[in-house]
Image (spheres, rainbow, N blue to C red):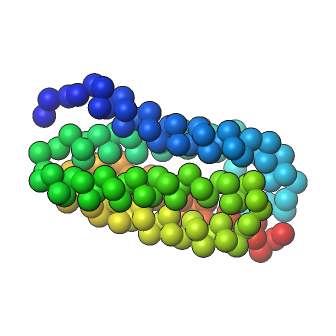
């Protein structure tokens, strides 16, 4: 497979930009979050942007592997649309949780995101197993985020 560096760069920048813009919209809300009752295993605040940056990089590489594959165009298109849908759902979760404080709604939204990530992994696996495996840490982190989200709802 010939590498298309511009496409790779775009695929990496897209999720980073989605996360960055979402973070801009929620800036300052970590102060409110830090004042809430926190569940056990809540990591220090600096962990979140670090982990999300890594996850967005992995997502970008995964999407590149799928988009640049030799799979049928319809299969790539379907996987790419599902990927973009989960990215959009991902974008809104911090707004609901941090900016609006809708903790229960955010948890339900996160369940939707979790299901979409699982569907993306399934779609990606039929095109490139490496891409599917690159999405697994995202699914695991989202599972952990679900625990934190639900616990914040229950504790506050």
**Where 144 sits versus 28, above or below?**
below
Q: Is residue 124 in view?
A: no
Side of 125 where 137 appears, left or right: right
Instruction: Tell me where residue 13 appears, x and y as whole percent.
Output: 44, 33
* Nearer to us in this view, 18 or 126: 18
Side of 121 where 70 appears, left or right: left
Q: Quadrant of residue 98?
A: bottom right
* Nearer to us in this view, 69 or 125: 69
The residue at the point 76 percent across, 59 percent down is 100
Q: Is residue 1 in view?
A: yes
The residue at the point 77 percent across, 62 percent down is 101
Instruction: Tell me where residue 34 appears, x and y as whole percent.
Output: 83, 51
The residue at the point 79 percent across, 48 percent down is 29
Side of 26 where 93 appears, left or right: left
Number of labels in the image equals 0
Q: Quadrant of residue 118?
A: bottom left
Q: Which quarter shows the C terminus? A: bottom right
Q: Which quarter shows the N terminus? A: top left
The residue at the point 67 percent across, 71 percent down is 105
* Nearer to us in this view, 97 or 128: 97
**Where 33 sits versus 8, above or below?**
below
Instruction: Tell me where residue 80 appears, x and y as whole percent.
Output: 31, 52
Instruction: Tell me where residue 120 appears, x and y as whole percent.
Output: 35, 60
Give the residue furthest to the top: 5
């Amino acid at each position: 497979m010939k590498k298309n560096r511009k496409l790779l760069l775009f695929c990496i920048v897209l999720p980073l930009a989605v996360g960055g813009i979402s973070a801009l919209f929620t800036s300052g809300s970590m102060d409110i979050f830090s004042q809430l009752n926190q569940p056990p295993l809540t990591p220090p605040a600096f962990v979140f942007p670090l982990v999300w940056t890594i996850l967005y990089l992995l997502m970008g590489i995964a999407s590149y592997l799928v988009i640049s594959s030799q799979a049928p165009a319809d299969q790539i298109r379907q996987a790419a649309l599902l990927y973009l849908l989960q990215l959009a759902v991902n974008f809104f979760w911090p707004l609901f949780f941090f900016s609006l404080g809708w903790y229960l709604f955010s948890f339900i939204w996160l369940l939707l995101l979790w299901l979409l990530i699982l569907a993306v992994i399934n779609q990606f696996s039929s095109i490139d197993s490496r891409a599917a495996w690159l999405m697994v840490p995202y699914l695991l982190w989202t599972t952990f985020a679900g625990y934190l989200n639900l616990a914040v709802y229950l504790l506050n």
